[in-house]
Image: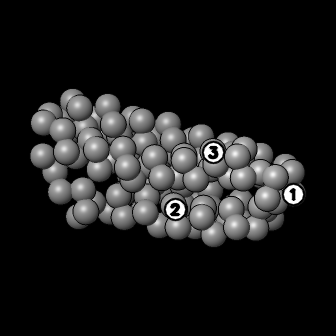
Amino acid sequence: MHNFKELKVWKAGIEISKIVFQLCKALPAEEKYGLISQMIRSAISIPSNIAEGCGRRSDKELYHFLSIALGSSFELETQLIIAKEFNYISQEKLDETSTIITEIQKMVYGLQKSLTT
């Protein structure tokens, strides 16, 4: 069992969740049950799955939950691109947020690699 609260990747997941919550405040109210809901769920899924994996008994299970967190990060990135396409967010916000997501993805890959060596 790993202490998820000490992992940089988990902390980064919390930060991206906060950023997404702020971005979603600017989206139109009619997206509350659509894009906003999806973006928030994807963002929250990243640190949540990292934490859940850390609570499991084996590195194999942790690896699995890291894969889910990784998938959620790619979902979130796609949803941000869609938000940009609808002019809900600026290119600058998309670029800034995508850079953070890419760093999270690299950290997840790195943690997964450490589990297989």
Q: Position of residue 74 (x, y in %)?
A: 57, 41
In this picture, residue 25 sits left or right of residue 3: right
Q: CA distance from mark 1 to mark 2?
A: 20 Å
Residue 104 in which image quadrant: bottom left
Please give the residue where the numbered disc 2 appears in the rendered image.
16
Q: Position of residue 28 (x, y in %)?
A: 82, 59
Q: Secondary structure at mark 1?
A: loop
Residue at 43 percent of width and 58 percent of height: 13
Q: Position of residue 43 (x, y in %)?
A: 53, 52
Q: Earlier in the sequence, mark 3 or mark 1?
A: 3
Q: Earlier in the sequence, mark 1 or mark 2?
A: 2
Residue count near mark 1 (Cα–Cα under 10 Å), binned few <14, some 14–19, many ≥20: few
Q: Position of residue 5 (x, y in %)?
A: 25, 63
The kind of residue on which mark 1 rests is: Asn
Between marks 3 and 1 in the image, the one whose residue lies nearer the viewer = 3
The kind of residue on which mark 3 rests is: Gln
Q: In the rendered image of this protein, does residue 7 appear above or below residue 86?
A: below
The kind of residue on which mark 2 rests is: Ile
In this picture, residue 90 sits left or right of residue 79: right
Q: In the rendered image of this protein, does residue 62 appear above or below residue 111?
A: above
Residue 81 in sight from this viewpoint? no
Residue at 51 percent of width and 41 percent of height: 72
Between marks 3 and 2 in the image, the one whose residue lies nearer the viewer = 3
Residue count near mark 3 (Cα–Cα under 10 Å), binned few <14, some 14–19, many ≥20: some
Q: Earlier in the sequence, mark 3 or mark 2?
A: 2
Residue 89 in which image quadrant: bottom right
Q: Are marks 3 and 1 in contact (CB under 8 Å)?
A: no
Please give the residue where the numbered disc 1 appears in the rendered image.
87
Residue at 54 percent of width and 46 percent of height: 42
In this picture, residue 5 sits left or right of residue 39: left
Q: CA distance from mark 3 to mark 1?
A: 17 Å
Please give the residue where the numbered disc 3 appears in the rendered image.
38
